[in-house]
Image (cartoon, rainbow, N blue to C red):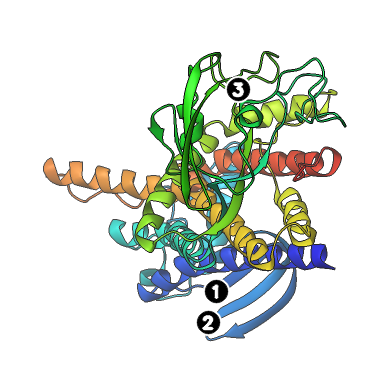
Amino acid sequence: MLSVLGIVVFVLGLLGSIALHEVGHMVPAKKFGVRVPQYMVGFGPTLWSKVRGETEYGIKAIPMGGYIRMIGMYPPAVRDRSEKSGRFSSMIEESRWESLQEVNDGEEHRTFYSLSVPKKLVVMFGGPFMNLVLAFILFAVSLSVIGSLAPTTQVQSIVACVPTAANVDGLASTDGSCGNGAASSAALLGIQPGDVLTSVNGQAINKWFDLSSSLNGTAGKDVLVTLKRKGESITASVRMTAITDPTLARAPGQGFLGVSPHMATERLPLAQVPGVVSEQTQSALQALIGFPKAVVTLGKTLTSDAPRDPTGPVGVIGIGRITGEISSDEQFSTSTKIGTLIGLLASLNLFLFLFNLVPILPLDGGHIASALFEGIRRSIARLRNISPLPGPSDTARMLPMTYFVAIIMIGTSILVAIADIVKPITLG
């Protein structure tokens, strides 16, 4: 039941994100006078709809996106329809004709194509901007209100032996020895659970991740370790061991202390949330740049016995599975589960913000690029005293490319969905 509840919560959060994205488009469009006949969340058959004013609001069966329909997305053709020739030209003109059928007499000023360039930019950027705002709010709730589990400098447990291929976990034998292996530095030093590390190799340990850098180049060397035990500061020297198995080694020359951290809920100050969002944005941008290559790799993985890359593309099915695992895992507290689910939705919204800004149609970024091109043409015409100014950008001419991109996106979604079913990514 907890697993199902987690999936339901994620789906509702996804639908909410999509709904707010479309609100980001609809509100400025209506503010600028554009008639919006439809506002829909999802694609496919309509599950529910209601007409209010001049707009039909509804929910469709497939929660993979959403849309608003604005009249006059394509401007009238410069040439007559009778001059069309060729399959693509016929398709373009037919789509243009169908779009203009929604424009009633006297409504030409209420079309999208009649908007000024700045207004077009506001309308098209409004959707991604809502995802960015939502991501920031969700990150703030997850990190500053609920908090997240983070490793502390307090020792939770000791790894008794240096890990080897035969003893990956570094467990001691029943008599407490390491057999043919070596005892860890923590075991030799007598570190106990509850001790708090304060300094290693002359470097202060203010957070857990300081420990890794302090151990660089210490393998086989004597190192001073300072810790606090029940309020008392203890400093001792120990010969730092190393993991010799190349398949388990973390970094050349890095010493192995042999401790694991105590995990505690950490709440970030709100002032630090923008920094986290900035870091997450850089990571998401790198993932977006590497997305095409990752999709190709995923396709190869499905046709081989190779394991799936856990950092590769994950679809709605995969994320739903992960949220279900999180919700049903008894190791996590309720607050941790809620914070993790909110964090996942925050990351998803951040990715949607960046993805929708990719400057290709049918994405919002394609319409933004088209509006910018329109503005540049008109600016050049003004500088050259050309009259009349160029008309609105004709995105109808990009329909063949738009359909091609849409087919690629649908194909990618199907490929990722199959991978999520056949080779799912799990918490394990």
Q: Amino acid at mark 2?
A: Glu
Is 404 placed above or below 223 here?
below
Quadrant where the image shows the N terminus = bottom right
Work out whether mark 3 precedes mark 2 in sequence or the reverse, and give the earlier one.
2
As helix, strand or loop, the secondary structure at mark 2 comes to: loop
- Report the side of 188 relative to 424 (left or right): left
Q: Is residue 78 visible?
A: no
The residue under label 2 is 54
Q: Specify whether 66 is left or right of 415.
A: left
Q: Quadrant of residue 98?
A: bottom right
Q: Give the amino acid at mark 3.
A: Arg
- For disc 3, the marked residue is 250
Residue in the image at 42% along x and 58% along y: 124
Where residue 17 sits: x, y (%)?
57, 64
Residue 186 in sight in this render: yes
Q: Earlier in the sequence, mark 1 or mark 3?
A: 1
Q: Nearer the viewer, mark 3 or mark 2?
A: 3
Which residue is painted at 38% across and 50% down in the image?
Answer: 275
Q: Residue at x 53, y 86 (%)?
A: 53
For the residue labelled by badge 1, is the local secondary structure a helix, a strand or a loop?
A: loop
Pointer 1: what residue? 37
| Secondary structure under the numbered disc 3 in the rendered image | loop
